[in-house]
Image (cartoon, rainbow, N blue to C red):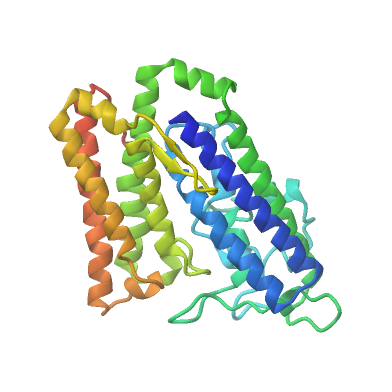
Amino acid sequence: YAEIAEASYADSIETAETLDAAIQALVADPSEATLTAAREAWLDSREPYLQTEVYRFYDGPIDNPEDGPEGLLNAWPLDENYIDYVDGDADAGIVNGTDTIDAASLEELSGKGGESNVATGYHALEFLLWGQDFSDDGPGARPYTDYLTDGSGTAANQDRRGQYLTVASALMLKHLNQVYTAWKDGADYRSGFESDADGGVEKILTGMIVLSGFETGGERLQASLDSGDQEDEHSCFSDNTHRDMVQDVQGIVNVWTGTYTRLDGSVIEGNGIYDVVKGVDADLAESLDAQITTSLSLANELQPPYDQEIKAGNAEGNARVQALIESLRAQETLLEEVFVAMEFSVPVVE
């Protein structure tokens, strides 16, 4: 588990470094090509990071209450007008304000005045790359000219917008490195985690159960299906929400099976939580194995763009989302049985 966590964050850093380079190229020379490259790099960066979300929810390095950076990395939902202009308000946001744009100020501003006042992380970068999404069949369409500083730009404060984008990207790398360092072999956190077998297994299962039911099945899928509003989808600017769901479930699969496929194609293999549960209740292990497999299959059946899957009147799309919700809830129920079988306390999320 710890080896896969370390590798997953290492891969997240590698893709974030590629994204950072693409963002610097965009700001230095704004064009359709450099904007497209930055967007593609953002999409690529999400693939390994989303698989790390299973390492949340137990006050580990990513979300411990003292200095865990999860809220600065992946906070959502995001109020767009806290960052930059929006339809109907050309002067909105930090970009069009007078606040200093540097790492310390963006960290301080993130979450200030409300949870949706997100100033940093993947979704802040997503909005700055795509802009608001007004399309039924595609993502946002922010023009590259928003970053031109030669007087021909399409929105004011192009220099501050570019500065914001580069500062936020560098901050994301800093926060990813913070978590990766804690999971490195020999690090204090990892050593303590590995030395507490029962406590470690309970934390592993906590990440799995909360991500399955409360977070993915509830906060991300059920809430958006109930509202039918694209503002409630996880990656609403890039229309990447379908991949968010797939990779969240894939992260659970990684932990369950004890395997992880790295960016270079190499595979880490070892004992997974499946092996632990099988030693306690073989039938329960097989039932949960089948349910997790079903969840991954149903996640892969979601059709992009996700905002059309949840749209009122799209019976087939709604049904696909609902089927995944029900599978994740069934997965949550089976994990509750695992907690009971192993004499752990089932976590309560409020």
Q: Nearer the viewer, residue 267 or 197?
A: 267
Res 201 quadrant in image: top left
Q: Nearer the viewer, residue 130 or 23?
A: 23
Residue 112 percent location from the top left of the image: 62, 51
Res 203 quadrant in image: top left
Res 43 quadrant in image: bottom right
Compared with 16, 271 (above or below) is above
Could you tell me if residue 235 is visible in this image? yes
Q: Nearer the viewer, residue 246 or 85?
A: 246
The residue at the point 35 percent across, 71 percent down is: 303
The residue at the point 78 percent across, 72 percent down is: 158
Left or right, 199 with respect to 186, comes to left
The residue at the point 51 percent across, 41 percent down is: 8
Left or right, 128 with respect to 65, comes to right
Residue 305 percent location from the top left of the image: 41, 73
Left or right, 295 with respect to 269, comes to left
The residue at the point 28 percent across, 26 percent down is: 276
Specify the quadrant that holds the C terminus. top left
Residue 143 percent location from the top left of the image: 67, 79
